[in-house]
Amino acid sequence: MSNNFEDRLDRLVHTSWAERESDAPRQIGKVKADAAHRGALISSGTILMIDQILARELETRAILLWQAIVRVHRITGVDEGVDLAGYFKRVFNRYLDEALKALLSVYERESQILGNMGIKISSNLTSIAELSIKKHDVEIDLYVDSLRGTSRDAVVSPANTYNFYGSVGAVQSGPASYANVVQHLAASEKQDIIDALREVKIALQNVSDRDEKETAELIELVDESVVELEKNTPNNTKLRAWFDVIAGTIQVLANAGPAYRALKTALLPLGIVLP
């Protein structure tokens, strides 16, 4: 594969991961604060919840990695004579191993105090990584199969279909693309979205340089999104449309950067990847 591909991929992967650096620590901090409030900070339950947070983060990074591989390949093309499937699998495994080691380091640091108390709990991160590799091996084979007998112009056409499996059900990339969603929101993932929406609402309430009526309507949309999310069977189609409007607005607000990043991270399990 060309150096151009490898350079673009490396930069894109690490940039997308860097945007998530504060997410897992933020969630871990919430878990620890809640556990401390209940007098259960030093407990197996707390470290298990931390492991689950890191497992979701690993799955998310795996999906962002595969998205980056597809995106860079479609733009830069492919060298003749390359075993594309084998190459992509090696690249995927190398980057995922990097993500695994980083998150295992976080787990070991967070669980050290429990180890000192004699509580030994093995992380599930390695098994999550192995499962992700198996899932994406299939995705890679299918992607390469789809390229056979297709001209390069057709390969880079804007109407593409992507299937990404894991904690994130799907990734939509660019206009005219569509995604097949395979996901079920866990209670914790739903709560993360609700918490992010509440941060958005606070940011909107502090806006002073926008039309008051427009801001009030957007706050109302945020409230309706929370109500919809709290239903047993929320309407995903309706939520996606609302989130597009909310995210598109707060993205340009000077004081809403943290709220936008929180919403961007929280929406990943719903299959929505914001720019």
Image (spheres, rainbow, N blue to C red):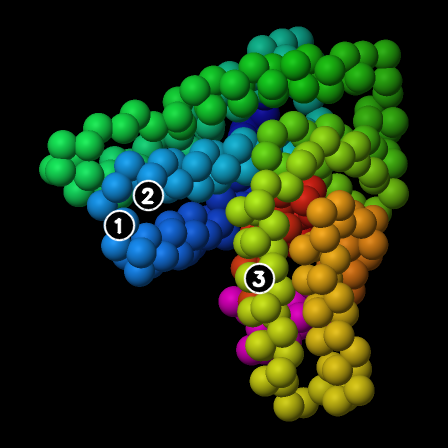
Circle on res. 196: 3
- Say which residue label 1 marks: 41
Residue 202 appears in the picture as rendered: yes
How far is mark 2 from mark 3, CA to CA?
22 Å
Q: Is mark 1 on a helix, strand or loop?
A: loop
Question: Magenta part mainly helix, strand or loop?
Answer: helix
Depth check, mark 1 against mark 3: the one in front is 1
Q: Which residue is drawn at 75% across and 74% down?
A: 220
State which mark lies toward you, 2 or 3: 2
Quadrant for the N terminus in the image: top right
Give the amino acid type for the residue marked by disc 2 in the picture: Thr
Q: Tell me the residue at 72%/52% (across/down).
A: 231
Magenta part of the chain: 247-258
Task: Name which residue type carries label 1.
Answer: Leu
> Which image quarter: residue 38?
bottom left
Residue 115 x, y percent position in the rendering: 17, 34
Left or right of 57 on screen, residue 34 = left
Q: Is mark 3 on a helix, strand or loop?
A: helix
Whether residue 153 is situated above or below residue 230 in the rendered picture:
above
Residue 74 placement (x, y as % from top left): 73, 31
Q: Residues within 10 Å of mark 2 (few under 14, many from 20)?
A: many
Residue beneath label 2, please?
Answer: 46
